[in-house]
Amino acid sequence: MRAFAVLSTLGAIVAGLWLLTTQPADSNSIFGPLLHAMGLYFIAKGLYMGPSLIQQTDTAAALKWLVEERSRTGGENDALNDE
């Protein structure tokens, strides 16, 4: 899952850089500033998405370990069982 997080982050950043270099921002067309805004958005999304996906992957792995450990021990020594 970490590989997908890294690939999606790099893909978004590369797409953003490509959009920034496609057309000059001071062109007479509406597409120049629009492409620059989209490029900045994709770069920011890539910088946010990568760490978020990595954290989600770590959380899912920790939860899976907790569930497997609880099923292996049968709930003994469980902090939720105060009986």
Image (cartoon, grey):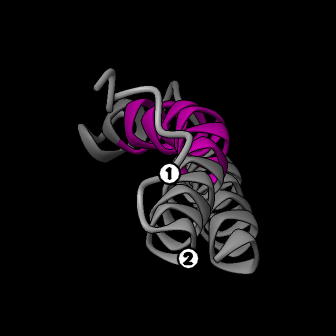
Q: Which quarter of the rendering shows the C terminus? A: top left
Q: Secondary structure at mark 2?
A: helix
Residue 70's place in the image compared with 49, above or below, is below
Q: Which residue is mark 2?
A: 72
Residue 72's place in the image compared with 66, above or below, is below
Q: Which residue is mark 1?
A: 76
* Magenta segment boundaries in residue numbering: 35-55
Q: Disc 2 vs disc 1: which is toward the camera?
A: 1
Residue 50 colored in magenta in the image: yes
Horizontal side, residue 61 vs residue 2: left or right = left
Residue 42's place in the image compared with 62, above or below, is above
What residue is at 75 percent from the left and 78 percent from the top? 3
Residue 58's place in the image compared with 37, above or below, is below
Closest to the observer: 7 or 25?
Answer: 7
Q: Mark 2 to mark 1: distance in Å?
A: 9 Å
Main SS, magenta region, reads helix
Residue 22 in the image: x percent, y percent? Answer: 60, 58
Residue 64 in the image: x percent, y percent? Answer: 51, 67
What residue is at 65 percent from the left and 52 percent from the top? 58
Closest to the observer: 47 or 33?
Answer: 47
What residue is at 42 percent from the left and 55 percent from the top? 75
Closest to the observer: 27 or 20?
Answer: 20
Closest to the observer: 7 or 27?
Answer: 7
